[in-house]
Image (spheres, grey):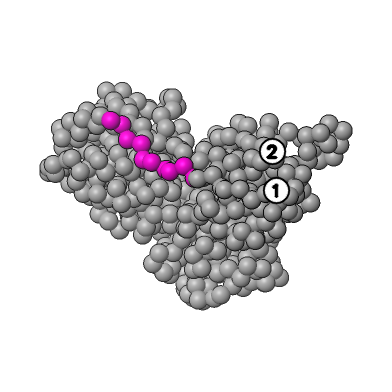
């Protein structure tokens, strides 16, 4: 048994089923050990994409997300996805190969201080030493999952990974106990007095067991629900208690503003303003009754709260809901009116365009379909139109809002579920990760890629126009994406109307391999859309 075997066995015990990355000489012993521990190693074409694949798998299966990279450029390539994991609360375990400390004093090829580069981005960084292999992994997993989840880095020196070790008992994984404030009486009194309560749910409830607790809390309190984009589907959006998503669309936010103003109590259920645009600074008066339930209290300065409850958000909601006597709320029916206005505001204005694409795919997608959305103008519009029928069914980067995330997120989700998964991406975002089409080919995954083709960085162009600036650096040439998909082992098609799209979508959802549907649109369709 080698040190790498102890690392792999401890990862498996912690719930890892897959690891993603690109092998290099410094991690070959680890890649071998992962397979023998029952953890399938999956090759990506870029470390950044590999990390998003790990996240996509975690969202649908709960498996511990693991990213593996070799030293130097492998680590540097992964910086973006590690930053995303921190801002989107993903308990990513990032294992990197490294040369031994003594060798690094004189051998400098590809060598830099991994921990120093990652320090601002990770919750912790460890370096395995002989005899600590399993302990370091156990500590890393505990830190990654504690409080607000986030990435943890492990540097694994070559000599430690390859050295023969004596089998020893693995450390017990520390139990994950729900943390709840001892005194919830003040919150209970605020709830009892409320006749127009409003819940805003967000990031801290994603990836936890909080969805059921949120549902029961709404039932007990009679409160309507607003969500951030990441929290869409925590309560299925066909439920009449769900008003809609907010945070990035000024158009949507203006429609829901009356509910915020009229509410006599706002309950923030795992809400983290890291997902929100600048317009969500001070969204209510400082004297508005607000209960802020968070995994970890932070001095972000974005909003005021009357009471902060720190701990496991789902458990706190459950305790508050159990002790609440139901009363009649929102006697004038304002939440239902706002819900209808919100849906009407984002209906397709014409026969073709991004609205029509999203409506057509929503009708064609089977129940329970997981979709991923890349960053850009299309994501903001999609997040208003796309109704989620369960939690974790619209995957996106909301804290960092990084482009190029949707395709690998969908890849990981499809690998975990074995079901067709949707990927919505703009042409610029897809061109960032075209190599991952070959990953889909090699893994034979049923991902349906819908490309909004407008030959521009649409969101940035809109901002330039709003600022009165000359258009610059946002336009690019056309790619034949359907031909690229066919060349890389998938099915490719270009459609220009709803009927063609519906036909291609039905066929794509029945296909075993990946499909790419290119949808040319006019970038001007986004103007005033959100």
Q: Residue at x 24, y 31 (%)?
A: 184
Q: Does residue 104 lie above or below 337 as drawn?
A: above
Residue range in magenta is 173-182
- Residue 125 appears anywhere in the view: yes
Q: Residue furthest top?
A: 287
Tell me the quadrant of the picture where the N terminus can be found: bottom right
> Where is residue 24 shown, x and y percent of the image?
76, 52
Structural distance between the alpha carbons of marks 2 and 1 = 12 Å
Residue at the image position 20 percent from the left and 33 percent from the top: 188
Q: Which residue is mark 2?
A: 129
Viewer-side residue, 486 vs 390: 390
Return the residue found at the far right: 106
* In front of the other: 501 or 276: 276
The percent coordinates of residue 311 (x first, y second) are 36, 35
What residue is at 27 percent from the left and 50 percent from the top? Answer: 215
- Secondary structure mostly seen in magenta is loop
Please name the residue that numbered disc 1 is placed on: 165
Residue 271, horizontal then vertical, whole percent: 38, 38
């Amino acid at each position: 048994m080698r040190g790498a075997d102890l690392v792999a066995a401890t990862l498996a015990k912690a719930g890892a089923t897959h690891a993603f990355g690109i092998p290099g000489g410094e991690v070959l012993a680890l890649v071998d050990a992962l397979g023998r521990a029952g953890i399938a190693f999956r090759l990506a074409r870029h470390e950044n994409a590999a990390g998003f694949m790990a996240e996509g798998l975690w969202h649908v299966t709960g498996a511990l997300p693991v990213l593996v990279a070799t030293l130097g450029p492998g680590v540097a390539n992964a910086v973006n996805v590690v930053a995303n994991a921190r801002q989107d609360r993903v308990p990513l375990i990032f294992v990197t190969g490294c040369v031994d400390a003594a060798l690094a004093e004189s051998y400098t090829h590809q060598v830099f201080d991994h921990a120093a580069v990652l320090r601002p981005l990770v919750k912790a960084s460890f370096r395995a030493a002989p005899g600590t292999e399993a302990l370091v992994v156990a500590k890393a997993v505990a830190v990654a999952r504690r409080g607000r989840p986030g990435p943890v880095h492990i540097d694994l020196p070559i000599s430690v990974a390859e050295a023969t070790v004596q089998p020893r008992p693995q450390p017990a994984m520390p139990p994950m106990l729900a943390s709840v404030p001892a005194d919830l009486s003040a919150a209970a009194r605020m709830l009892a007095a409320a006749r127009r309560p409003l819940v805003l749910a967000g990031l801290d409830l994603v990836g936890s067991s909080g969805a059921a607790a949120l549902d029961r809390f709404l039932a007990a309190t009679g409160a309507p629900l607003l969500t951030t984009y990441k929290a869409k589907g925590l309560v299925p959006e066909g439920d009449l208690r769900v008003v809609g998503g907010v945070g990035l669309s000024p158009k949507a936010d203006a429609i829901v503003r009356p509910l915020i103003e009229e509410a006599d109590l706002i309950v923030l259920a795992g809400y983290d303003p890291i997902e929100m645009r600048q317009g969500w600074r001070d969204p209510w008066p400082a004297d508005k009754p607000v209960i802020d339930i968070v995994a970890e209290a932070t001095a972000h300065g974005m909003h005021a709260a009357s009471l902060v409850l720190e701990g496991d958000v789902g458990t706190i909601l459950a305790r508050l809901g159990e002790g609440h006597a139901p009363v009649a709320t929102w006697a004038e029916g304002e939440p239902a009116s706002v819900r209808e206005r919100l849906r009407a505001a984002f209906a397709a204005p014409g026969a073709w365009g991004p609205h029509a694409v999203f409506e057509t795919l929503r009708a064609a997608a089977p129940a329970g379909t997981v979709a991923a959305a890349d960053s850009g103008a299309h994501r903001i519009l999609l997040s208003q139109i796309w109704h989620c029928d369960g939690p974790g069914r619209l995957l996106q980067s909301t804290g960092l809002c990084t482009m190029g995330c949707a395709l690998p997120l969908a890849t990981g989700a499809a690998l975990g579920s074995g079901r067709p998964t949707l990927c919505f991406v703009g042409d610029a975002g897809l061109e960032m990760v075209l190599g991952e089409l070959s990953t889909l080919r090699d893994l034979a995954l049923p991902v349906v890629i819908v490309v909004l083709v407008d030959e521009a960085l649409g969101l940035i162009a809109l901002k330039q126009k709003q600022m009165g600036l000359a258009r610059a650096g946002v336009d690019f040439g056309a790619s034949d994406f359907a031909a690229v998909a066919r060349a890389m082992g998938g099915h490719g098609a270009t459609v220009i109307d709803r009927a063609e799209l519906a036909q291609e979508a039905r066929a794509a959802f029945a296909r075993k391999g990946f499909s790419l549907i290119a949808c040319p649109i006019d970038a001007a369709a986004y103007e005033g859309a959100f």
